[in-house]
Image (cartoon, rainbow, N blue to C red):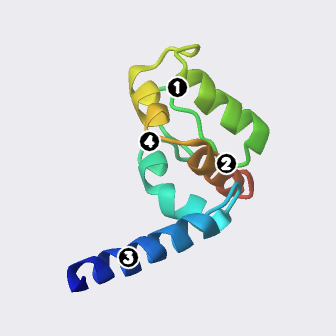
Amino acid sequence: MRKYAGWLIGSGLACSFAGEAGAGDLAYGEYLAGECVACHRAGAEGGIPPINSLPAPYFVEALKEYKEGERDHALMRTVARSLGDTEMEALAAYFEQLEN
């Protein structure tokens, strides 16, 4: 019974955190943004567009289009496929409020 107590407590904490990271959660978006800003930054070279200040609905739609293969970019398709709706919305909210 004791070996399951730790699992139950850990599961509760994980569920509690997941519940806090709802759609458009800025803190969660900031947490997830590290991978994005590795390429998407102001002044990036090679045709990589900055994503700061993009309207959140456009941002989410673009990610969904990459995920579904409607937009063609292998790396972005891979990244988008790893994201759920909650992550996409949190990232969109975070980048929307950043200035260029």
Residue 78 rendering spot, x and y as whole percentages: 40, 29
Q: Do the residues under discs 4 and 3 have CB atoms within 8 angstroms? A: no
Q: Amino acid at mark 4?
A: Cys
Eye-nearest disc, 1 or 4: 1
Q: Marks 2 and 4, how far apart in space?
A: 19 Å
Judged from this view, the residue extending furthest toward the left is 3
Distance (Cα) linking label 1 and label 4: 18 Å
The picture places residue 60, in percent across and down from the top left corner, at 68, 37
Q: Read off the residue under disc 2.
A: 89
Q: Are marks 1 and 4 in contact (CB under 8 Å)?
A: no
Q: CA distance from mark 1 to mark 2?
A: 14 Å
Label 4 packing within 10 angstroms: few (<14), some (14-19), many (20+): some
Secondary structure of residue under mark 2 = helix
Q: Nearer the viewer, mark 2 or mark 4?
A: 2
Q: Which of disc 4 and disc 1 is earlier in sequence?
A: 4
Q: Earlier in the sequence, mark 4 or mark 3?
A: 3
Q: Which residue is mark 4?
A: 39
In this rendered view, identify the residue nearer to me: 39 or 20: 20
Report whether residue 45 is seen: no
Which amino acid type is shown beneath numbered disc 2? Glu
Q: Residue 83: which numbered mark, if any?
A: none
Residue on which the image places disc 3 = 8
Residue type at mark 3 is Leu
Residue 3 lies in quadrant? bottom left
Mark 3 to mark 2 CA distance (whole Å): 29 Å
In what element is the residue under mark 3?
helix
Mark 1 to mark 3 CA distance (whole Å):
33 Å
